[in-house]
Image (cartoon, helix red, strand yellow):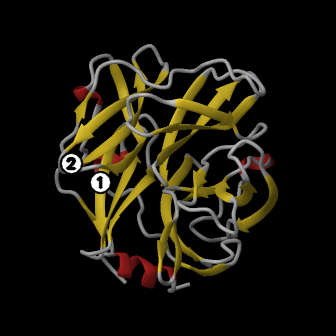
Amino acid sequence: MTDVVKRYEGNPIISAQMIPGANAVFNSAVTRFEDRYAAVLRVESKHGFQTMRMAWSDDGIKFNVEPGEIMAPTEEPYLTYEEAIYDPRITKIGDDYFICYAAENRYGCQVSVSRTRDFRTFEKVAIASEPTNRNMVLFPEKINGMYVRLDRPFQPGGQGHIWMCDSPDLVHWGNPRCVIESRRFAWDQGKIGPGAPPIRTDEGWLVIYHGTTPRCNGLIYKTGVALLDLDDPSKVIARGKEYLMAPTEEYERVGDVPNVVFVTSAVPDFEKDEIRLYYGAADTCFCMATARITDLIEFAKTG
C-alpha cells in the first residue's frame, strides 16, 4: 500500500516560535474535549528544562498555547521525586482523562499517571513503575475488570520491546508480559515502544508504535502499526511488515534530534473513517497527518 498517511501541508502545526522562551515543542498529546481539541504540550525551554503547557484548538490544527506550566514536577508520595516530566499521552476512560508521562529522577526514568476532567485541575494518581521505563499508554476501557497498559522497559544495549501489565487501581501493577518484540534485520530492529493509546476497532485494538533503525550516525525513528486481540490484547493478530511513516520532510530530518517521527496521539473519527496522527518531528516541532482507519487496519495485515 502506498500513500496511507497524508501529512498536513501546513506542518509543523506548533513550533517553538509560537511559545515565548521555548527552544522546542514536540512529543505532545492531543484529544477531543467537548467541542474542541485539547493538547498537553511537551515544551523545552531555552534554559533546557522540560515543561508541560496547555493548548486549545477548534479545528485540531490551529492551536492557542496558554501561558504558564501545568503538572510541574512534584514530590511523589509513593516512591521518589519527579525532576523532569515529558512525553505525555492522553486516554479517556469514563469521565476521566488520564495523562501518562515520563518522569525522570535521580534513579532513572519512570512513568507517572495524572487525571483530569477539565484540563484545568490535575490530580496526581501515582508513579506507576520502577526505573527504568517509558512510553506508557492506557487502553481506553477496562479489560476483564482491570486497567491495562502498554509500556517500554529499558534493556541493556539500547534494546527495548513493548510490554503489557494490569492494575485494579492505576497504582498497583502486575502480570507483566512482553507483547511486541523488535525484529532483527528489519526497520524496527532497535528499541520499539507504544506511540498513541490503543484504539478499539471491530478488527482488534489498533496500536501505533515507534521503532528505531540503528545507523552509524544515530537512530532513525519510524512508525509502525499492529492489531491486538480485543479480549486478550497480549495476543498479536497482525503487524505490518513495513513502516508506516519515516522521516522524509525537512522538519522531520533536521532538528535537535534528526530523523525522528514520533506519534503520540491518534484521534479517530469513525463516521468519516479518518484518523488524525499527531507526532513530534526531529525533537523540535509538532505535526499532524491523516489516514483512513480501514487503511491502517489493512496495512497492519500486510505482515
Q: In the figure, residue 21 lies in which quadrant?
A: top left
Residues under numbered marks 2 and 1 in contact, where contact means CB atoms less than 8 Å apart: yes
Tell me if 19 is positioned left or right of 222 in this view.
left
First in sequence: mark 2 or mark 1? 2
Tell me if 151 is positioned left or right of 294 in this view.
right
Residue at image mark 2: 61
Residue at image mark 1: 288
The quadrant the N terminus occupies is: bottom left
Residue at 55% from the left image edge and 46% from the top image edge: 217
Identify which residue, 27 or 59, lies in the foreground. Answer: 59
Residue at 37% from the left image edge and 81% from the top image edge: 294
Q: In the figure, residue 164 lies in which quadrant?
A: bottom right
The percent position of residue 18, horizontal first and vertical second, equals 23, 28
The percent position of residue 15, horizontal first and vertical second, equals 27, 34
Residue 247 visible in this rendered orientation of the protein: yes
**What separation in Å lies between label 2 and label 1 (alpha carbons)?**
8 Å
